[in-house]
Image (cartoon, rainbow, N blue to C red):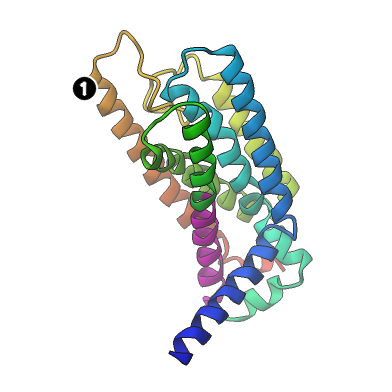
Amino acid sequence: MLGYKSFIINLFRLAKYNMRIIFGGKFGYFILAALIFFLLFGTIMAFEDSEMDLGDIYGILLFPAILLVFYPTAFGIQNDADQRTLEIIFGIPDYRYKVWLLRFFMVLVLVFILLIPFASIAYYALMSFPLFRMVFQLMVLVLFTSSLGFMISTLVKSGNAAAVIMVVIGLAFLILGEPLEGSKWNIFLNPFNIPRDVNDLVWQETIRQNRLFMGLTSVGFILSGLLNLQKRERFL
């Protein structure tokens, strides 16, 4: 029992230490910013749209989800450099893979946990909806965004540069939103916003292919990022 308690305490300390590095000591600010944007968008939507649907709820939760995962993935390596832990991570063979994969997983779990109360507020304040289904659908985009940010950060080694590149990519997909509307290649595809002129079976297949495309692409981004970490001299 004592060993189990000690394991939990050490695990909590490890998670706390890594989260402090991941968010650069600004973890609370990101939660607060995500909450403010969520409440702001939700309030505006509630007053402007009297007939709210699941697609609207997905759109309201979309920005806080991306905001929560944006900083830790884009600035992860730079924060390690600033904290002077990059040399330690690269100093132990294959240790860097375990560290960044653990942090990547921790960020995803944390965003998933934080999205539940956000979705719960929308559930009770705006309309009822399948809460966990909504969160899981959002996590597909969270996984894609975080893996893309991780890969880009291993290429440019600068948090600011990675953030700019991600914003440019995001804007490009937003501009292409209308031409790609209803397309399986649209990373911002809203699975709850069913087009009127599309058959339900066709729409479900489009969503399945879109989620498969984003999932496989995310795995490719992660593997590419890990391969980039083999080039130690580029980071030190």
Determine the residue positioned at 40% across, 43% down: 136
Magenta highlight on residue 104: yes
The residue beneath circle 1 is: 201
The magenta segment is 93-111
**Can the viewer see residue 93?**
no
> Extreme top residue here?
197
Magenta highlight on residue 14: no
* 235 or 123: nearer the viewer: 123
Q: Is residue 126 left or right of residue 198?
A: right
Determine the residue positioned at 72% across, 45% down: 161
For the residue labelled by badge 1, is the local secondary structure a helix, a strand or a loop? helix
**Can the viewer see residue 12?**
yes
Determine the residue positioned at 73% across, 59% down: 24
Q: Please, is residue 48 above or below residue 133 in the view?
A: above
Picture coordinates of residue 59, whole percent (x, y): 52, 27
Q: Quadrant of the N terminus?
A: bottom left
* 219 or 4: nearer the viewer: 4
Identify residue type, mark 1: Leu
* 123 or 218: nearer the viewer: 123
Q: Is residue 30 left or right of residue 2?
A: right
Q: Please, what is the dominant secondary structure of the magenta stretch?
A: helix
Q: Quadrant of residue 215?
A: top left
* 5 or 210: nearer the viewer: 5
Picture coordinates of residue 216, whole percent (x, y): 37, 45
Q: Is residue 231 left or right of residue 195?
A: right
Picture coordinates of residue 69, whole percent (x, y): 59, 47
Q: Please, is residue 14 above or below residue 225 in the view?
A: below
Determine the residue positioned at 71% across, 53% down: 28
Q: Please, is residue 97 above or below residue 148 in the view?
A: below
